[in-house]
Image: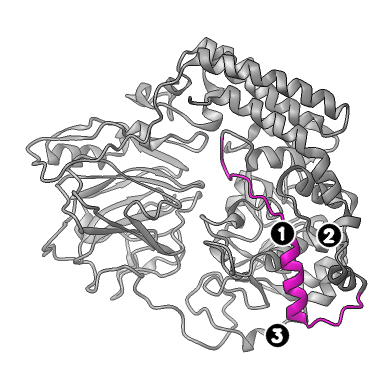
């Protein structure tokens, strides 16, 4: 039996209502910090070493930690932020981190609205595949534009005599600043302490031990992306004192624990812990150098940076003369990119790929040097599995998809504010290029200076596409023709659709392979669909109705407690999805477009998540 969204939300409602009392009691500060060793640390009477105190608090905040999905049709980070960052003066809005603007909750993931800001950024050690990715202590709503302008900069106080200081750091956030040649970011005064305490928490919560895909996060005065070191610690310590904990921060901390994640930020509940857990930082001159790292402030001296050639790169650099013994330019083309988490990339080969063949995709920019790539980003590698891949069969990559032929090295993380991708082969040839950076391809590769920029390798002059700066891009042209015809279509920007609002399920959209004329099928093709089987809306409605009665009992049992709304929200979602099913017998068949004026956009279906809310007037009435 397949349980659809009606039953799913009914189950979620029952679960929320039944569990609320248990977590209220656990998250009460008197019980949460009741352990003898923890109480001694809080009281300042502990005889433990600094490292032992770190471990005790790490164990505390990890003990009952419950990770929620970053993006899901069930309760996810979007839902949590709409709740815990609600504007106390307008229940329909959230408060934005840097601009401090009150923004409608429904404006999530829109260009003029808000998105999810990682305060400890992904490029400084927060991974895509670990539980740290969706830790809501570290996530807050932020203006979409301001989030992009902050990027992955570390935090620091900007000095008036620094010629690179810009105030404001963003026109949409008048109390912010950017400085140290654009490498640092200063939040508004009213949020400096909040930001500092989030970073203190992250350095305690994640030590790289006992959890998959989690790094050891450190704070220092030497921010370094390669060492997962965030800062500047000396400024964070000052901010913690200058902007003390307020009632709103305590309320958010309690909501995180009791409603979602089941842990608290100790530095919000007991601010004095900061002085016990964090010593005055070493001066930057004694820190590890991240030479060439654009996120380092350039003042450190010391050890060498990582190797210049990306891990997984061919032993010889990509060829510029086209003398390739294996894959060559145009043999594998990019047909879809989604840069907001989880990253999605779809590629289609124009030739049959035999077992063991490898190609790489990197978001490192091409700078024309001997090493060919900048090294501040990452690389993913696809190894063709047993049986091979036939020409025309679409290959999908998604964050966390290791084990399906993909492996990764470095921080492969196409930016939501523009980036470039280069495909190259295991024997040293560039294969394809795609850019969606606002600058397009940089004409002189030696002038590439930021992580978003890339030159175009000369061998890809005819095998590339330059697209507008958006988050979601997909080829919508014909999937039939000769190799030359398909290559030309995919390299034509007018045959792509782009937007920044709604994601597309690439597995379903590219369910049918491309038809490459005269291609020989040397290997069997696996079913690429990944699409769930058919559904019965009548069965879904029956089970949903049955479970909704259980929800009603649970809601009555809880009574009029302040958290009853979460139970009701899931019940409302169950009814909403049932009504959508009545209006449209297959919710996965919704048709919408990236671009209302683009050709062939009627085929762009189905949509996940918020996309369902966009379909038809009956659905609009329910949102």
Residue on which the image places disc 1: 63
Query: Picture coordinates of residue 90 (x, y %)?
Result: 82, 32
Indicate the secondary structure of the residue bearing disc 3. loop
Mark positioned earlier in the residue sequence (3 or 1): 1
Q: Residue at x 83, y 76 (%)?
A: 276
Q: Residue 393's quadrant in the figure?
A: top left
Q: Residues within 10 Å of mark 1 (few under 14, many from 20)?
A: few
The mark found on residue 147 in the picture is none
Q: Is residue 176 visible?
A: yes
- Does residue 359 lie above or below 238 as drawn? above
Q: Nearer the viewer, mark 3 or mark 1?
A: 1
- Seen from the viewer's position, the closer of residues 575 and 590 is 575
Q: Is residue 171 left or right of residue 148?
A: right
Q: CA distance from mark 3 to mark 2?
A: 25 Å
Q: Is residue 85 left or right of residue 32?
A: left
Q: Nearer the viewer, residue 598 or 262?
A: 262
Which residue is the site of mark 3? 282
Q: CA distance from mark 2 to mark 1?
A: 18 Å
Label 3: few (<14), some (14–19) or many (≥20) C-alpha neighbours in 10 Å:
few
Name the spot of residue 417 as percent of width and height, x first.
50, 50
Q: Secondary structure at mark 2?
A: helix
Range of magenta residues = 44-72
Mark 2 or mark 1, whichever is nearer to me = 1
Q: Quadrant of residue 527?
A: top left
Viewer-nearest of discs 3 and 2:
2
At horizontal 83% and vertical 51% (from top left) the residue drawn is 27
Q: Earlier in the sequence, mark 2 or mark 1?
A: 1
On residue 268, the disc is 2
Q: Residue at x 76, y 20 (%)?
A: 552
Q: Are marks 2 and 1 in contact (CB under 8 Å)?
A: no
Give the tally of numbered discs: 3
């Amino acid at each position: 039996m397949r349980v659809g969204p009606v039953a799913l939300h009914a189950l979620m409602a029952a679960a929320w209502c039944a569990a609320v009392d248990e977590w209220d009691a656990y998250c009460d500060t008197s019980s949460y910090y009741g352990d003898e060793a923890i109480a001694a640390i809080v009281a300042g009477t502990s005889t433990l070493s600094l490292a032992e105190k770190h471990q005790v608090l790490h164990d505390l905040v990890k003990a009952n930690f419950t990770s929620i999905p970053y993006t899901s049709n069930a309760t996810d980070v979007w839902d949590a932020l709409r709740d815990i960052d609600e504007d106390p003066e307008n229940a329909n809005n959230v408060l934005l981190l840097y601009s401090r603007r009150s923004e409608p909750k429904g404006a999530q993931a829109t260009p003029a609205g808000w998105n999810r800001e990682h305060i400890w950024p992904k490029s400084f050690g927060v991974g895509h595949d670990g539980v740290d990715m969706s830790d809501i202590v570290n996530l807050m709503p932020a203006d979409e534009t301001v989030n992009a302008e902050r990027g992955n900069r570390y935090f620091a106080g900007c000095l008036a005599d620094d010629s690179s200081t810009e105030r404001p750091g963003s026109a949409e956030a008048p109390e912010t600043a950017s400085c140290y040649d654009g490498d640092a970011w200063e939040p508004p005064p009213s949020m400096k302490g909040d930001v500092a305490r989030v970073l203190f928490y992250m350095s305690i919560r994640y030590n790289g031990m006992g959890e998959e895909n989690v790094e050891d996060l450190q704070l220092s005065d030497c921010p370094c992306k390669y060492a997962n070191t965030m800062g500047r610690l000396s400024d964070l310590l000052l901010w913690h004192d200058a902007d003390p904990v307020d009632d709103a921060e305590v309320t958010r901390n309690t909501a995180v624990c009791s409603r979602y994640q089941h842990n608290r930020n100790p530095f919000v509940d007991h601010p004095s812990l900061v002085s016990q857990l964090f010593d005055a930082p070493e001066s930057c001159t004694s820190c590890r150098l991240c030479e060439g790292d654009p996120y380092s402030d350039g003042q450190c001296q010391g050890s060498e940076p990582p190797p210049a050639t990306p891990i997984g790169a061919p032993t010889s650099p990509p060829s510029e003369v086209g003398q390739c013994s294996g894959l060559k330019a145009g043999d594998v083309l990019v047909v879809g990119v989604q840069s907001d988490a989880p990253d999605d990339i779809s590629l289609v080969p124009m030739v049959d790929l035999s077992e063991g063949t490898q190609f790489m995709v990197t978001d490192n920019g091409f700078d024309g040097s001997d090493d060919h790539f900048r090294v501040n980003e990452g690389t993913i590698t696809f190894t063709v599995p047993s049986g091979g891949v036939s020409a025309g069969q679409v290959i999908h990559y998604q964050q966390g998809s290791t084990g399906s032929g993909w492996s990764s090295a470095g921080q492969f993380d196409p930016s939501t504010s523009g980036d470039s991708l280069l495909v190259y082969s295991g024997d040293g040839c560039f294969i394809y290029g795609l850019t969606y950076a606002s600058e397009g391809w940089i004409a002189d590769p030696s002038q590439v200076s930021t992580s978003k920029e890339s030159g175009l390798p000369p061998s890809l002059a005819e095998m590339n596409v330059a697209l507008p700066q958006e988050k979601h891009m997909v080829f919508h042209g014909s999937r039939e023709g000769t190799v030359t015809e398909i290559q030309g279509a995919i390299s034509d920007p007018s045959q792509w659709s782009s937007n920044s609002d709604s994601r597309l399920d690439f597995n379903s959209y590219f369910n049918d392979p491309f038809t490459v004329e005269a291609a020989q099928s040397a290997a069997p093709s696996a079913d690429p669909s990944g699409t769930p089987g058919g559904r019965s809306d009548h069965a879904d409605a029956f089970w949903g109705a049955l479970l909704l009665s259980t929800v009603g009992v649970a809601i009555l049992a809880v009574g009029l407690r302040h958290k009853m709304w979460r139970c009701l929200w899931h019940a409302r979602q169950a009814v909403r999805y049932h009504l959508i099913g009545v209006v449209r017998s297959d919710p996965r068949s919704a048709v919408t477009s990236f671009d209302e004026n683009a050709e062939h956009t009627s085929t762009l279906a189905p949509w996940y998540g918020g996309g369902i809310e966009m379909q038809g007037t009956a659905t609009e009435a329910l949102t």
